[in-house]
Every structure is written in structure tokens, then in C-alpha cells.
Image (cartoon, rainbow, N blue to C red):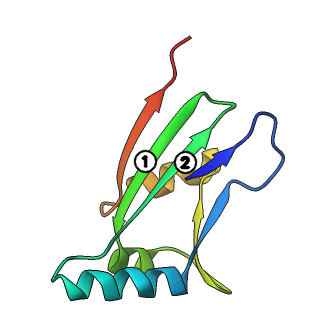
Amino acid sequence: MRMFKTDSKESQAFVVEKDHLAKLERFAAQFGMLPVFALLISLVDERMMHLLIMPVAELKKSLPEVKHGYSIRFTPTKRSELMAKLFVFIAAGKRRR
């Protein structure tokens, strides 16, 4: 889970580390499963949570590579690009008042 707090000035990005993906791939291989990465993003300012689920192979091919992994950028401008990728499943929920 990644939570962006109220009025936060930090970058809305998350790095999926390569060593974590390697562990996930080894675990999935032991059981004959497809390795899938999931991330829950909580945007407090927007009162919104997004659940991203994507196959590891597609994540590695499609997301920008950075020093230790792959970057998921979740700024409002980049969010629509991420949601448009066919391999990403996104569920969103808005908190009621």
C-alpha cells in the first residue's frame, strides 16, 4: 500500500523494486502460477483509493525502468496513461462523507 497524505508535496510515484519482482516470480514458478503485482494507492486529498493489478511480465516491458526497478507514476496527468494500458486492472473507490 502507498498512501499520499493530505497536502503532500511528495512525488506521486512508486518504484517497484527488481528484487521484489524476482521473489514474486520465483514464488509463482514454484506453484505454476502467473506472477502478478498488486498495489493499493490511497490519495487522501482526493478521498480516493486505487487498486492496481498487473502481470509482472507486462509491468517489466511497459513501465519506465529506473535505477532499482520500475516506476509507477500516479500524478493526475500520468494516471490516465497508466489506466489506458490494457494489462492494468484498476479498481477505484471514493470515500463517502
Amino acid type of the residue that numbered disc 1 sits on in the rendered structure: Leu
Rendered residue at 33%/89% (across/down): 26
Rendered residue at 65%/50% (across/down): 75
Residue 33 location (% of width, % of height): 19, 77
Counting other residues with Cα less than 10 Å from the Cα at mark 2, is it few (<14), some (14-19), or many (20 or more)? Answer: many
Amino acid type of the residue that numbered disc 2 sits on in the rendered structure: Ile
Counting other residues with Cα less than 10 Å from the Cα at mark 1, is it few (<14), some (14-19), or many (20 or more)? Answer: some
Q: Compared to 16, does 46 lie above or below?
A: above
**Earlier along the polypeptide chain: callout 1 or callout 2?**
2
Rendered residue at 18%/82% (across/down): 31
Place residue 34 in its image quadrant.
bottom left
Per the image, the residue denoted by label 1 is: 51
Per the image, the residue denoted by label 2 is: 41
With 56 as the anchor, is 65 left or right in this view?
A: right
Provide the secondary structure element on which disc 2 rests. strand
Residue 6 location (% of width, % of height): 76, 33
Q: Are marks 1 and 2 in contact (CB under 8 Å)?
A: yes
